[in-house]
């Protein structure tokens, strides 16, 4: 067996329906499929969600939206962080850009005027406190005025993003973010002749702050089975499996791996697993990382190599060819991440294209 990433579309469907059950029936759902569907397979995920009736997709960059369009996806696609060099891709492939800065807004208005484009759907991003991208509360009216003075843009949605909705200690800050967003939209809505979509909730916002629901939710990590340890049962979509390629008997006092980073304290059976930092397994797993073999945790030892990791097999009765669980629906990517103090997002999105994707439908 080689290293594979199994993507369970049945679990994806379960998560989608579970999340939908938490909000009002009329509330729209936007699925975040950026970063190749959080390290899975963006096209397979999008096709499944489109069949389930998702209302919107969002991606980070225009190139990701182009990939979806080329795969036959018809559902509207929001580009969260479009760049000024991607205007042709956006308009040629019917993508909808987020307008998040005066520079981008002015350049997009200029482009659409030159191309004689009118009423192009855009999404107005408000920075309510995350301070990543978007117009701050004191910039909203000026930005809206620029858009209103041009007939090239049609505001499809107004949105913001919560920064700490999973942290119970940041409730006051999160409620202030929601209030700031509401103040901003109160300045805009009376001047519009239509009702744009309003959205602010991420996965943890959906669970913890129903007042941030508005009329659409954005769900990313929750669709893939993770809820930042919140009170909701979801099913992980990703499962990374590998194999014991070789077992080496190493005497006490010998070194294992590059730079002699690990010295054995006793006679040690070392398992060689065909997965390395070129596949997305960071060297941070040198200390504290582990894999599962025959339901036993086996610690990673030595420096992780480009193509392999080495593990201590002394606690398990293993033979060459045995299956290795990097993470699955029982020993999850969240558990794997916790072992070295990182987050599931980083683990999933680091998985390289070299790992074969296997769709479980």
Image (cartoon, rainbow, N blue to C red):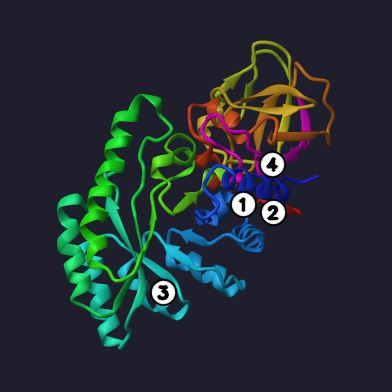
Q: Is residue 346 magenta?
A: no
- Residues at discs 2 and 1 in contact (Cβ within 8 Å): yes
Discs 1/3, front: 3
Label 1 – label 4 distance at C-alpha: 10 Å
Label 3 – label 2 distance at C-alpha: 28 Å
Neighbours of disc 1 within 10 Å: few (<14), some (14-19), many (20+): many
- Mark 3 or mark 4, which has the lower sequence index? 3
- Residue 270 in sight: yes
For disc 3, the marked residue is: 90
* Mark drawn on residue 100: none
* Mark drawn on residue 40: 1
Discs 3/2, front: 3
Label 2 – label 1 distance at C-alpha: 7 Å
- Mark 2 or mark 1, which has the lower sequence index? 1
Q: How many marks?
A: 4
- Per the rendered image, the range of residues in magenta is 223-249
């Amino acid at each position: 067996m080689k290293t594979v990433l199994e993507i369970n579309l049945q679990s994806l469907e379960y998560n989608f329906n579970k999340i939908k059950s938490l909000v009002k029936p009329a509330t729209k759902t936007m699925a975040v499929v950026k970063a190749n569907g959080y390290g899975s397979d963006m096209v397979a995920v999008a096709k499944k969600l489109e069949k389930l009736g998702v209302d919107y997709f969002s991606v980070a960059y225009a190139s990701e939206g182009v990939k979806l369009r080329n795969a036959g996806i018809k559902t509207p696609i929001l580009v969260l962080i479009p760049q000024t060099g991607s205007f042709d891709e956006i308009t040629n492939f019917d993508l909808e850009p987020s307008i998040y800065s005066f520079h981008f807004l002015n350049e997009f208005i200029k482009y659409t005027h030159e191309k004689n484009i009118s009423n192009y759907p855009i999404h107005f991003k408000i920075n309510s406190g995350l301070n990543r991208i978007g117009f701050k509360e004191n910039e909203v009216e000026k930005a809206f005025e620029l858009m209103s003075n041009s007939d090239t843009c049609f505001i499809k949605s107004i949105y913001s993003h919560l920064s700490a909705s999973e942290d119970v200690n940041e409730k006051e800050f999160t409620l202030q973010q929601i209030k700031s967003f509401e103040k901003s939209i109160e300045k805009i809505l009376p001047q519009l002749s239509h009702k744009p979509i309003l959205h602010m909730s991420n996965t943890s916002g959906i669970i913890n702050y129903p007042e941030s629901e508005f009329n659409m939710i954005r769900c990313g990590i929750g669709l893939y089975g993770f809820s930042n340890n919140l009170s909701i049962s979801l099913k992980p979509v990703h499962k990374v499996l590998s194999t014991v390629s070789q077992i080496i008997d190493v005497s006490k006092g010998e070194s294992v791996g590059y730079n002699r980073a690990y010295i054995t304290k006793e006679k040690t059976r070392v398992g060689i697993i065909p997965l390395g930092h070129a596949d997305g397994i960071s060297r941070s797993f040198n200390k504290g990382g582990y894999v599962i073999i025959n339901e036993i945790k086996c610690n990673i030892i030595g420096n992780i190599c480009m193509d392999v990791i080495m593990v201590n097999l002394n606690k398990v009765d293993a033979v060459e060819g045995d299956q290795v669980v990097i993470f699955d629906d029982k020993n999850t990517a969240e558990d794997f991440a916790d072992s070295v103090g990182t987050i599931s997002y980083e683990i999933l999105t680091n998985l390289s294209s070299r790992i074969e994707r296997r769709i479980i439908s």
